[in-house]
Amino acid sequence: MRKMIVTLLAAGMLSVLLVAPAGAKGRPADAPDTACMQAGMATLKSIDAFSAVAKDGLPIATAVAVGVTVRDGADISAVPDPIPLKVVLADHRAGDNSLFVYPWCG
């Protein structure tokens, strides 16, 4: 009887793990997308732009040159050009609520 109960509990826990909803990449939907932010920082470093962006901001033309696009329906009229690094990083963490779509974020 005890073995049957343990087996049923294990099966129940497994089914919860298999069907539990999760956000992108297995993170809760409201969690910051830090993986996207880290990938964005790595991209800036790969084009030797991280230090310059940290100091002077990210020109929108540079972002476009590496494949960044404006998310459908996003209003970027108030976004400064260049974009301060803290704003770029915050937008990366915003996940599906970001103003921009980043090709390195899945």
Image: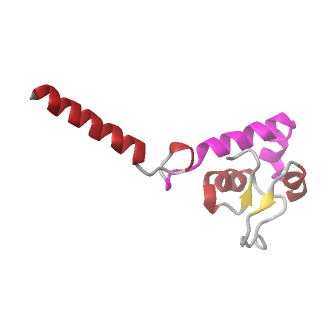
Residue 63: x %, y % from top left = 84, 53
Residue 38 part of the magenta-drawn span: yes
Colour theme: secondary structure
In the image, 76 versus 102, the foreground residue is: 102
Main structural element of the magenta stretch: helix, strand or loop?
A: helix
- From the viewer's perspective, is residue 22 above or below residue 43? below
Residue 47: x %, y % from top left = 87, 37
Residue 102 falls left or right of residue 32: right
Instruction: Please identify the residue farthest to the top as the structure is shown.
Output: 3
Q: What residue appears at the point 84 percent right and 51 percent down from the top-left corner?
A: 67
Residue 46 part of the magenta-drawn span: yes
Count of all numbered marks drawn on residues in the image: 0
- From the viewer's perspective, is residue 71 above or below residue 67? below
Instruction: Please identify the residue farthest to the left as the structure is shown.
Output: 1
In the image, 42 versus 23, the foreground residue is: 23
Quadrant containing the N terminus is: top left
Q: What residue appears at the point 50 percent right and 54 percent down from the top-left corner?
A: 29
Q: Quadrant of residue 94?
A: bottom right
In the image, 13 versus 82, the foreground residue is: 13
Q: Quadrant of residue 71?
A: bottom right
The range drawn in magenta is: 29-58
Q: What residue appears at the point 77 percent right and 67 percent down from the top-left corner?
A: 79
In the image, 47 versus 105, the foreground residue is: 105
- From the viewer's perspective, is residue 81 above or below residue 53? below
- From the viewer's perspective, is residue 46 above or below residue 67? above
Residue 20: x %, y % from top left = 40, 48
